[in-house]
Image (tube, grey):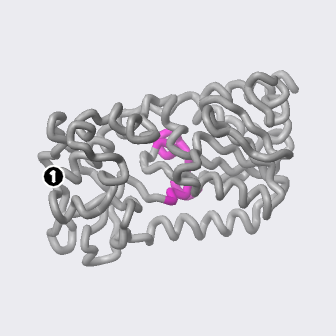
Amino acid sequence: MLTIDDDTAYTKAATAVKAARALVITAGAGMGVDSGLPDFRGDKGFWQAYPAYETLGINFVEMATPRHFSEDPTFGWGFYGHRANMYREAIPHVGFAILLDWIHRFELPWFVVTSNVDGQFQKAGFDEQRIVEVHGSVHHLQCQNPCEPEIWPNEELFDIEPATMRSQQVPTCIHCGDVARPNILMFNDWSFVPGRSNAQQRRFDHFIANCPKPLAVVELGAGSAVPTIRWTSEMLGQKHAATVIRINPREPQIPAPHISIENNGAIALAGINKALLSSK
């Protein structure tokens, strides 16, 4: 395994990027840490971000369920409304710009696959049509029933009471007037409307089937607790002969010939970029 203690990791990653004829960026919650966003790692990490829930004895899995929107919508929207506000205010870190620079500099066809619901790739300038949000997006709404399979933009502004984590605003369905919820795939979720995510996945499948090879996969901040993104990266490495560059400060392990870098995304991407610039 190659780590940040060995400059060879950055050199090998730079070589893989420079040799690639297409690029896939896969990203988990750790991608947002350098932008000041919490990754909710474990109960303690969740409670550090949201002390009110520790007082209430509620962990992330219990909070991230759709039942709150039917049983207590001001409480459900306290969590997701706060997150919507936070993600709107966040500024994407320099790593996003480095990735865009590689795409333009090397004229690479590309796609993003992310488990994040924060919309940071779009905010950083990545084309909406080249992003798969496998768990949906807090910036889109659906009926909590749902009465119709329609998804629409979340344009609500939320006032959250920090002590109780309740929202003064509860969005409603544009069709039936019932409570609306985020178009996010939650735990124990049987009412998620998958139309938007399915359309994104179809575009990605078409891209993979037709993109030039070799393919480089840059994976950022994807943990093993919910391993969807790690599985996606590894599947591309196995079935499409891609070189996977796994960047993760805690769980960077991946078998050779893939590349492991034990660091946060912004630092590691800057290190790879430095190696790319010095290789000219």
Highlighted range, magenta: 120-134
Quick check: 255 above or below 188? above
- Magenta-drawn stretch contains 190: no
Q: How crowded is mark 1: few (under 14 residues within 10 Å), some or many (20 or more)?
A: many
In the rendered structure, the answer to whether residue 101 lies left or right of residue 21 reads: left
Q: What residue type is labelled 1?
A: Thr
Residue visible at 54% across and 38% down in the picture: 31
Residue visible at 22% across and 51% down in the picture: 77
**Residue labelled with disc 1:** 74
Query: Which quarter of the rendering shows the C terminus?
Result: top right
- Secondary structure category for the residue under label 1: helix
Residue 159 visible, this orientation: no
Q: Position of residue 22 (x, y in %)?
A: 76, 51
Q: Where is residue 261 in the image (x, y as percent from the top left)?
A: 72, 33
Quick check: 94 above or below 57? above
Residue visible at 32% across and 43% down in the picture: 83
Near-viewer residue (278 or 253)? 253
Farthest residue, direction front: 57
Residue 45: which quarter of the image? top left
Residue visible at 80% across and 53% down in the picture: 242
Q: Position of residue 219 (x, y in %)?
A: 66, 44
